Image (cartoon, grey):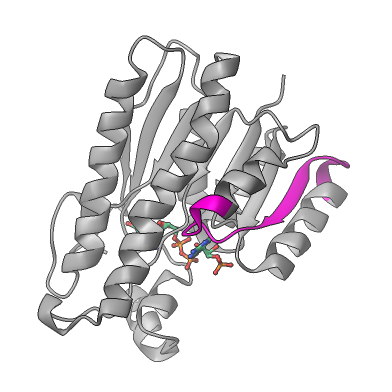
Amino acid sequence: MPHVVFITGASAGIGAACARAFAAAGDRVVLAARSEDRVAALADELNAAHGDDTALAVALDVTDAEAHARVVADLPAPFDAVDVAVLNAGLAKGLRPVWENTSREVDQMVDTNVKGVLNGIRALVPDMLARGRGHVVTIGSTAGHAVYAGGVVYCATKHALLAINEGLKVDLHGTPLRATAVSPGLVETDFSLVRFDGDAERADAVYADTNALTADDVADAVVYCAHAPERVNVAELLVTPRVQSGYT
Ligand code: NJP
């Protein structure tokens, strides 16, 4: 039976790669992001490649708890019984000493990377519990294992994400549900463009001296965790470039 996989941040980067990888593996995917046109285009691509009802696009800002719950509750068949939640939407902003971060930058990172994931868990897990089947995969980071200069808030959100994954496993103990954190190192996506406010030169420089992962590398890891036999829970998967000098 194909899984139904709900992916946040599916309009770009790792989320879009996960969508392509799950669809190629025969699963159905719900593509959630704020950029409605981008997820709609990706859904069209996947439905053309893998057959109708492979992909459904939904507009979602994960920071909006009510919208998150509503989007999940309103999913039409055959996308309405979500088996795997890939809670991937995230960003970094304003990489400067923490006292120089604006309150907007702090809000953007905490609201998206932490509260957005909690909103996803609250929207999706109750139905998984009711059906006795489900898997929550959060996309963390090597930044959840360290703190680097200028990245205090981002790193703190990714430390929080690992705590959420650990806590979720505790709360899910005795249920058939699984919880996994996939923690990538440096991945070549729009992530750096976002964290440097669209400065492409700075973003490119990040990848110039490193053999960064591709988004597909991370997607393969996510699919591996989700497709592991039911008796297996991959608690956390750290996936880094073979050579990585620091933390993203
Ligand atoms: O970044 P990018 P990645 N509501 O910028 C979406 C982690 N990570 O794929 O809403 C809903 O290409 C945004 O969509 P849109 C990182 O922390 C990365 O690299 O349309 N969606 C887009 O689809 C993050 O958790 C690296 O703008 C929202 C997606 O998020 C995850 O990987 C290293 C949203 C971002 O795509 C994916 O990042 C690492 C919202 N409020 C961890 N805000 C790395 N790239 O090096 C944003 O260790 N999105």
Say if residue 224 shows up in the picture.
yes
Say if residue 209 shows up in the picture.
no
- Give the vertical position of 44 relative to 129 (above or below): below
Please give left or right for residue 48 compared with residue 146 in the image.
right
Q: Where residue 22 appears, x then y in whole percent?
A: 64, 39
- Give the vertical position of 164 relative to 8 (above or below): above
Residue drawn at (57%, 44%), measured in percent from left and top?
Answer: 69
Residue drawn at (29%, 46%), measured in percent from left and top?
Answer: 161
Is residue 60 rendered magenta in the image?
Answer: yes
Q: Where residue 30 appears, x then y in whole percent?
A: 68, 45
Residue drawn at (15%, 84%), measured in percent from left and top?
Answer: 100
Residue drawn at (25%, 64%), measured in percent from left and top?
Answer: 154
Q: Where residue 74 appears, x then y in whole percent?
A: 72, 42
Please give left or right for residue 164 compared with residue 60 in the image.
left
Is residue 217 rendered magenta in the image?
Answer: no
**Numbered range of the magenta stretch:** 49-66
> Which of the 4 quarters of the picture holds residue 43?
bottom right
- Give the vertical position of 178 relative to 7 (above or below): above
Please give left or right for residue 36 compared with residue 117 in the image.
right
Please give left or right for residue 150 compared with residue 234 in the image.
left
Front in this rendered view, residue 206 or 83: 83
